[in-house]
Image (spheres, grey):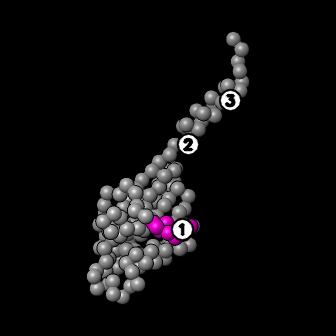
Amino acid sequence: MAINYSTIIGLSVVVACSSGCVDYGRIGAHKVTFARHATLRAPSEDEKLRELVRDALAGKGFEEQPGTPYIWRKGGTTVQVYRDKEGELVLKVRAFGSKRDVRVSHRTEQELLGILKRHAELEITSITPPEQPVN
């Protein structure tokens, strides 16, 4: 029986990739509610939340992508601010990729929640992540 070296090399690459190229993921979603008196001072709740998130992510390597939903990306980590089907303001932090992306996502989420909780006019409630934002 003849050994085909290209087959052995190909199988080795497949085995190496399948054992070392595993994808991981996580999602954290939070409903953000503003106290009614706070909306009189701010241009809008959406813009105020975007400003807070923008300030928190500044200088941390996130690329801002305005739109609906409003998105920031860094590697496999994504931060979104949008309104869900019921019109509730949602902050979603998710990751898909390596273990590092998941760690960045978790750390970013915890930092954002810490910053947002310091604002008395905000109420933050963890929610089951919605399927998809409404455009």
| Crowd around label 3: few <14 · some 14–19 · many ≥20 (10 Å) | few
- The numbered dot on residue 108 is none
Label 1: element kind: strand
| Front in this rendered view, residue 21 or 64 | 64
Q: Earlier in the sequence, mark 3 or mark 1?
A: 3
* Front: mark 3 or 1: 1
The span from disc 2 to disc 1 (Cα, nearest Å) is 28 Å
Q: Quadrant of residue 8?
A: top right
Residue 76 lies in magenta, yes or no? no
| Crowd around label 2: few <14 · some 14–19 · many ≥20 (10 Å) | few
- The residue under the point 39% across, 81% down is 44
Q: Amino acid at mark 1?
A: Gln
- The residue under the point 31% across, 80% down is 121
- The residue under the point 49% across, 74% down is 54
Residue pointed to by mark 3? 9
Residue 74 is situated, as x and y percent measured from the top left of the image, at 54, 62
Label 3: element kind: helix
* In the rendered image, the vertical position of residue 20 relative to residue 9, given as above or below: below
Label 2: element kind: loop
Q: Earlier in the sequence, mark 2 or mark 1?
A: 2
Looking at the image, which residue sits at the far top?
1
Residue 41 is situated, as x and y percent measured from the top left of the image, at 36, 88
Give, as a single range, the part of the protein colored magenta. 63-71
Residue pointed to by mark 2? 21
Residue pointed to by mark 1? 65
Quarter of the picture holding the N terminus: top right
- The residue under the point 27% across, 82% down is 36
Query: Can residue 13 be seen from the camera position used here?
Result: yes
Q: Are marks 2 and 3 in contact (CB under 8 Å)?
A: no
Looking at the image, which residue sits at the far front?
135
